[in-house]
Image (cartoon, helix red, strand yellow):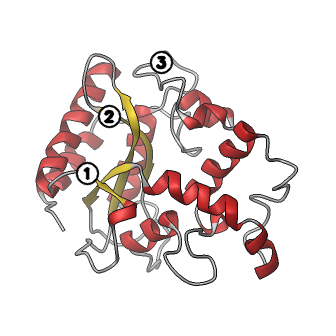
């Protein structure tokens, strides 16, 4: 099968998943009180960019969690890190050092808006003290506003944490399938897509807010595993 055929099947599976869960969500409207599955894979879409010749929104971020043996991170914990804080000292903001998605979005905004002098230490280190986090809060809020507005879906895959988990397998191959990095472009992202402003060519070329696996080639068999997971996923 061709990559184009596999992409069509992939997006058809996402359409089926959307029907199963009752529609795409946005993090702006999500809370931990919703009945999230403990483990899964998530797919974020461009807000206004459809695939070529279809009305299906393009996938622009694929992610999962608990791919280290013994990890206790849940699906909602990972999504909440991307959403950011709803209350407290950093209300409306978040911690981009705990979310690579937030980090990449923030870097693209810095490039687009020429904010490098204002945020010279964005993405530096794995932690930051209160003073630096407050200095970065305005930008964290801009990142939150962008990410919280993106439509997304999730699929329940509940196997044990580890690098060989089905979640890691689906994530890796979904990224490899959708990525346009160093290959003929399929479903190119629009000129307005924020990722085009990223300083990382893996993002600008792949069309994804991902770095890992964008240069790989997918195994078509992952679509069968994804299909099984879609059939086993229901709404919140």
* Horizontal side of residue 202 vs 25, given as left or right: right
176 vs 137: above or below:
above
Q: CA distance from mark 3 to mark 2?
A: 16 Å
Name the front one of labels 3 and 1.
1
Q: Secondary structure at mark 2?
A: strand
Residue 103 appears left or right of 161: right
Distance from label 3 to label 1 (Cα)?
26 Å
The answer to which of 39 and 163 lies nearer the viewer is: 39
In which quadrant is the C terminus drawn? bottom left
Q: Position of residue 196 (x, y in %)?
A: 61, 31
Q: Residue at x 29, y 43 (%)?
A: 222
Question: Residue 184: image x %, image y %?
Answer: 49, 15
Which badge, 2 or 1, is on the more N-terminal residue?
1
Classify mark 1: residues with Cα within 10 Å, few (<14), some (14-19) or many (20+).
some
Where does residue 150 sit, x and y in percent of width and height?
41, 49
Label 2 environment density (alpha carbons within 10 Å; few <14, some 14–19, many ≥20) = some
Question: Circle 2 sits on which residue?
Answer: 57
Q: Would you name the residue on which mark 3 appears?
A: 185
Can see residue 49? yes
Nearer-N-terminus badge (3/1): 1
Mark 1 residue element: loop
Front residue of this view, candidates 29 and 161: 29
Is label 3 in a helix, a strand or a loop?
loop
Above/below status of 195 relative to 115: above
State yes or no: discs 2 and 1 in contact (Cβ < 8 Å): yes
Circle 1 sits on which residue? 24
């Amino acid at each position: 099968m061709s990559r184009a055929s596999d992409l069509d099947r992939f997006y058809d599976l996402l359409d089926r998943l959307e029907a199963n869960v009752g529609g795409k969500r946005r993090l702006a409207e999500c809370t931990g009180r919703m009945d999230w599955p403990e483990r899964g894979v998530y797919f974020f879409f461009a807000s206004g960019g459809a695939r070529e010749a279809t009305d299906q929104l393009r996938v622009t971020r694929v992610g999962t969690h608990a791919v280290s043996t013994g990890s206790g991170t849940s699906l909602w914990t990972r999504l909440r890190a991307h959403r950011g804080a709803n209350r407290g000292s950093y209300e409306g903001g978040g911690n981009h050092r705990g979310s690579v998605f937030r980090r990449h979005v923030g870097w693209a905004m810095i490039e687009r808006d020429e904010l490098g002098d204002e945020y010279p230490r964005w993405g530096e280190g794995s932690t930051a003290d209160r003073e630096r986090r407050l200095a970065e809060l305005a930008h964290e809020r801009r990142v939150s506003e962008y990410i919280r507005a993106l439509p997304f879906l999730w699929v329940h895959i509940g196997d044990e944490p580890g690098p060989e988990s089905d979640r890691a397998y689906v994530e890796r191959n979904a990224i490899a399938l959708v990525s346009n990095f160093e290959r003929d472009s399929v479903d190119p992202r629009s000129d307005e897509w924020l990722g085009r402003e990223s300083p990382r060519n893996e993002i600008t070329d792949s069309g994804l807010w991902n770095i890992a696996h964008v240069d790989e080639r997918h195994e078509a068999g992952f679509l069968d595993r994804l299909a099984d997971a879609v059939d086993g996923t229901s709404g919140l």
